[in-house]
Amino acid sequence: MSYRLRPDRNAAKEVVRVARKRLRKARAALEAPASERAQGVHQARKRFKETRALLRLVRKPLGKHFARDNQRLRDASRSLAASRDATALIESWDALAAANDKLFSSPPVQTVRKRLADRIPSAGNQSEDAAIADVLVAIAALEGDIGSLKLDRSGFSLYADGLERTYRDGRKALKTAIQEPNAHNLHEWRKRVKDHWYHTRLLLLSWPALFKQRSRLLKELSELLGDEHDLFVLCTLIENEPALFGAELTRNQIAFAASQRREELQSAAFTLGHRLYVDSPAVLHKRWARLWKLTRRDGFSSKRASQTFRGSECGVVNPRRNHCLP
């Protein structure tokens, strides 16, 4: 329930509650023992992304505070990126290897993987310790500032502009990526997909059975685009640091396998994206607002809403009568 906005509570207070809880979780992740540092950094960066998406949902009501707090969260996440980026490259490599066992099990290619793994910073290095210390200070300041935010809208109207804007931006980014599927356009689309995924999770109590399904598909789309981007990073590294990848034949084989996989991931992402972004922004906004208001009108508490919508066989239920819609 922690990353949920509750329909039966004050909307402005819900934003503050969720934001502060995300920041507390980020702080706890960064205070984990050195042996758990890599996972802690990864979890903290996730919490920062969730908080930024929440702020985008209320971007217009936040006014000048949005740019300030969004920048602080972005800076905090970026300062922790080095070790995570190196780890993500290995994860991308291993996923590619799973589909190309013969090539990636060869001794020359195994040697390349070892070189890439050696680039991951060791836990407890001084530069990472300093970065984490700075981020913990930033979190403390953000917690205080977010706790004092004043949002002058109520109910779903507090979320409506942000929801429609990020969804519209996602549709535009999809169109741009289809017209010119380069790494920049695909990465920009992924960022907008993640915004809509986070917003779906935040507003899930409008209709849990349906929104959980949508959330799952948006996460799948984000992962397709994330895997594609990681392979682009690998291809770029091959071009920029060829010596890291051994002989020319080995480099070419790895690059070809990565390029093929990128094409497959792009195709799957476009197919799924067309379906998830089929509605116009106005239609999606209107439908989600009505669902939210129905939930409030019928007097559902957060707990009762989750229980009422759980277990539908078709996954699509009427939020008032609890039966499958046609």
Image: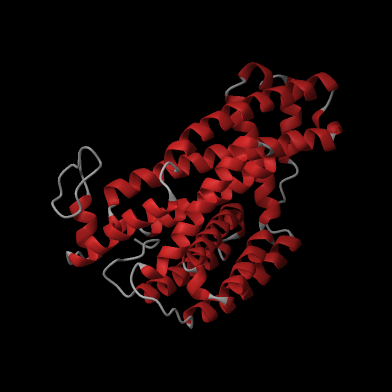
Q: Is residue 243 left or right of residue 174?
A: right
**26 shown above or below 209:** below
Q: Residue furthest top?
A: 102
**236 shown above or below 3:** above
Image coordinates of residue 11 in percent, x first then y, are: 36, 72
Quarter-wise, where is residue 256 in the image?
top right
Q: Is residue 309 left or right of residue 73?
A: left
Q: Residue at x 46, y 35 (%)?
A: 272
Q: Nearer the viewer, residue 51 or 24?
A: 51
**290 shown above or below 316:** below
| Colouring method of the image | secondary structure
Q: Nearer the viewer, residue 211 or 73?
A: 211
Quarter-wise, where is residue 151 in the image?
bottom left
Image coordinates of residue 114 in percent, x first then y, are: 73, 34
Image coordinates of residue 3 in percent, x first then y, are: 40, 61
Quarter-wise, where is residue 306 in the image?
bottom left
Q: Is residue 146 left or right of residue 115?
A: left
Q: Residue at x 68, y 44 (%)?
A: 184
Q: Nearer the viewer, residue 98 or 5?
A: 5
